[in-house]
Each structure stands twice: as C-alpha cells, then as structure tokens.
Amino acid sequence: MNIYVLLKQTFDTEERIVIQNGEVSDDGVKYVVNPYDEYAVEEALRQKDIHGGNITVISVGPDRTAEALRTALAMGADDAVLMNDDRIPADEYSISRVLAAFLSNQSYDLILGGNFSVDTGGGQVAVRLAQLLGIPHISSITKLDVESGKAKVLRDAEGDTETSEVTLPAVFTAQQGLNEPRYPSLPGIMKAKKKPFQNLTLDDVGLSLADITAKTQRLSLTLPPARKAGQMIQGDPAQQAASLVQLLRTEAKLI
Amino acid sequence: MSQTYLVVAEVRGGSLRQVTLEALQAVSQIKNQDDLVAVALIGSQITPLASELAGYTQGSVYVIDRPELETYHPELYLDALQIVMDKVNPEVILLGHTAIGRDLAPAVASRLHGGQISDVISIAKEDGKAIYTRPLYAGKAFETKQFLEGPQVITIRPNNISAAATVPTPGDIVELEFTPKADLRSIIKDVIRKTSGKVDLTEAKFVVSGGRGVKSADGFKPLEELAEVLQGAVGASRGACDAGYCDYALQIGQTGKVVTPEIYIACGISGAIQHLAGMSQSRVIIAINKDPEAPIFKVADYGIVGDLFDVVPLLTQEFKKVLV
C-alpha cells in the first residue's frame, strides 16, 4: 500500500506569539510537526505494519521544514519530499495545487493529513487536495481500518461519531484520539539520515506561477489585548458561590 | 456590477443554527446595496424551516430536501449545493465554521478554483472592500485578510458576529430537485448521536470546563449539572482529555476547539498557554482552582480559590435560584 502523509511544520503549542516588524517573530521558537499531522504519521506507520507498503511524507515549506520531515522519517516513514520554493504563496489554494501537481504523478492508496494546523488553522488543504485529485475524503477521523481496497473509519462530527466506508484511494484527516504518536527512537533518528529525501521546486512538478496565484492575502497582524486578572472572591464556598452569582448579575450583567 | 452572496444554512436537532443567522448578518455587513442574497437549505425534512429562514432575508431560499441528505455526506452535499450554485451563480459563499462548514467549504472553494478565508470572527469594510479578521495560533494572534481574485468562500466562527434580525418582507422559497448519484465512493453506515439535545460547545453561551483537577470521568458530573442549569456545554482541558476523563471532542485549546462564550467557567484547570489560546476571547472568565498560584487566575475576571467539588455544586444551586 502506498501511503502519503501531508505534513506541516508549526510552532510548538507552548510558544508565545511575538510580533516584530509586522511579522510573527520566530526568534528562539521551537518548531514541531503539527500535532494533528503527527497522528497522521503514526496512523501511516500502523497501517504499514498491517498491510506493508511505503510511506512518503510530503511538505510545502522553507528549508527549516526539513527538520519536521526528518522527525517523521525517524518515526519510521520511508522517504520525504519537500516542496521548497519561495515562489509558492502561503495561500491554501496555492499549496493544494502544488501538492496535487506532485501527487497526480504518483500512485497512492491512502493520503493522510491533520485535521487542521495549529498555526494558521484554515483546515483547507487536505480537503482541497481530495477535490483536485478527484478522490473522496473523510475529515476528522478517530479510527481507520483498511481491508480489500476499502477503508472503514470513525469520524468525529462535533461530538457525534459517524461510521463510514470509503473506496480507496481517499484522503483522511486525523483528529485527536486516532492514536498515540510514538517518539522517534535513537536508531530511528540515525536511519532517518540515510533515507531518501527529495527537494523539489515548482518546475519539477510542472507548475507555472500563473497556476498557483494566491487567492487571498494577509493585510495585518495583531495580538489580542492582554486580559487582566480580575477579583478574587473571598469567603467560605457557600459565600463564594453566592457572591459570584451576585456579581454576574449586578456587575457583568450576564445573568 | 451586482454580486450574489450565497449563505449555506445549517440545521441541528431540527432547528436552524444560530451561525446561519450570523452568516446572514455578515452578508449584510459586506454587500453593496444592489447585490443579491440567496440561501441554500439542504437536508432531510428541513422544508418546514424554509419559511422561518426566509423571515431573515429578502433573498431567495433554495431548498433541497431529500432523505439521503439526513446526515452530512461530503459528496452528496457538494452535489446538492452545486445545484443551488448553478441556479444563482454566487461570487461569495458563506458557511458556518462548524463540522459541516469546515468540511464542505474547502471542497466548494476547490471546485470553484476560489479562495477561502476560514474561521472569520469579524468583518470590516474599507474603501468598498471587505476585510476579514481571523485567529492565528487559535487566538494567540489575529490577522486581517482580503480576497485577491476569483470566487470567495468564507466560514464564520459561531458566536462572534451578531445574528441577523427578521426582515419586514421575507424572501421567497424555491424548492429544487436533486437526484443523488448512485455510485457514491463513501457510505455513512451509522451515526452515534452523543450530542443530541445538547448545546454545541462552539455555539454555547456558557461553557463549564474541567481540567486535571476533576480527577476522573465521574468528576465531570457536577460540571455537567452546572452546564445543564445554564443551558451551556461542557468542555475540558488537554490534561483532562489525555488522562482519559473525557472525550477529545470536548478539548478546548490550540489543539482542540476554540470557544468564545459569554461566560467560561474553568474548574480545576491550571491554565497552560495552549489552553488559554482556546478560551481567552470569552467575555467573562471564571476560574475555580485549589492552587492560588494557578496561571488561570491571571486571565480570570472572577477567581475562586477552593475545591471545585465544594464550589461547583453550590454554584449550581445559586444559579438555579436566579434562573428559575
């Protein structure tokens, strides 16, 4: 089975955001594999354990993204592709076109990605890609079983659980609860250094700039106003509860 | 030249979702006077809601009512929506940033070769052009965006834009035929409705949230009782989910959901930065925690240092007194 995992490198979720000269500063920031994409990598490894095959991790991003792909290789993926080209705009339309251009020349059974990225959080690329490749998608899955060309999945739909059956090839996006991602092992990290790693540009996938024109554009960036600590409510628990409800009525006027 | 705005309506538990009315309000914020509005109402046994929906817009409400559309299905809903799109040729399509909207919107945008701005929380108009504000890093920062070219797809985050008011002359209702294709590549076999009758977390006006301090799955009981009295929803921190006290569907934070209720009650939650990202845009934050040094108190409007198992049931009683 040929498995492709879409991967994005993001800030660690523990990072604070600092804006400098109108941009998010990455000074001293720790980068990680987008947590939802980690589930996708882990799921690919589990499916390969059962069905055999090959796992390719693919990302669109700058040089530093190689580190996230190496992490996936160290977890056990077989090879990596980095679409590394400054001309690719940070727009979901453009990114999905680039991925589709690459994947349309590959043979794939499963394409896995995260439900969304914890940075820009648009949640678009995987679903767009399925459309561009003309294959079905199921987003936000919490269980995946593959058998004779079909996948049986559980999907989390705002807390409801749906059971679906899909004919492969198909795109799936991972929700929390799908699995528990492994940590790369030391031998895994050593092996990762020798695994195939391709750096590609737009020209390599036969795209011109006109094919990937951005459809949206960022205008500005701001931080939310800092919240101030309010008041601590004193007394025994019964007094605290009564005072709080009283304050919500008279001060906050929300009850 | 006039443009057409298409709002994709959503129904949950037999009622129109609030976010649909918020999307209609968003349209009235961005549209020019001579622009047209249309609404797509797609589902099963949803025709009775068409006249209610028409009461909120002067535009036409296009209804596709088929038993096959009872549960959201990516291929079927996209095909059904395509029939409405063929009818009205929209330049701008708006959906809720909900389970359905998040799934359907990128498929629509891709099919139209258009752009999409997801999870919009407010809209401004500058020099006749719409500017959209949306969160980054789940709300640790915000960006404004604009469309550059082509069809536009927008998803609206629930609870952030005020709902549309009723209009004096309701729009007309147009029922459209739709024959679902037979050769579907995916089939929904079964749906377990764990949420029926419950308020959706992202749309709730009140959220009662539990962390590691809740200690067990049973520990969520008092929180559920409080949420019920408030007609709100129960949420959780990553710590509580990782510990197996509750389903990941409840998780609030940078991984998980972002909520913006009127009142957020954090019970036994320390307030890790990744959790704060998911709730700090709430209007009023209340924190209940044993540890007076917990970072959650730094963002809370009202803090109670105490044991949640003492405080929460008492709070439930107090709310009952004033709400009944």
Image: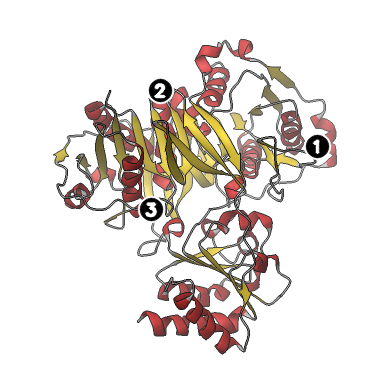
Between A164 and B260, the one nearer to me in the picture: B260
Is residue A194 toward the left or the right of residue A89 in the image? right
Q: Amino acid at mark 1?
A: Gly
Q: Indicate the position of residue A47 as horizontal and vertical percent values.
A: 61, 38
Viewer-side label of 2, 3: 2
The residue at which mark 1 appears reads as A188
Q: Are marks 2 and 3 on the same chain?
A: yes
Image point 46% across, 59% down: which residue? B201
Q: How far apart are labels 2 and 1 at the CA level?
A: 46 Å
Q: How is the image coloured?
A: secondary structure
The residue at which mark 3 appears reads as B191
Q: Are marks 2 and 1 on the same chain?
A: no
* Residue B300 visible, this orientation: yes
Image point 51% across, 43% down: which residue? B134
Q: Which mark is residue B98?
A: none
Between B224 and A183, the one nearer to me in the picture: B224
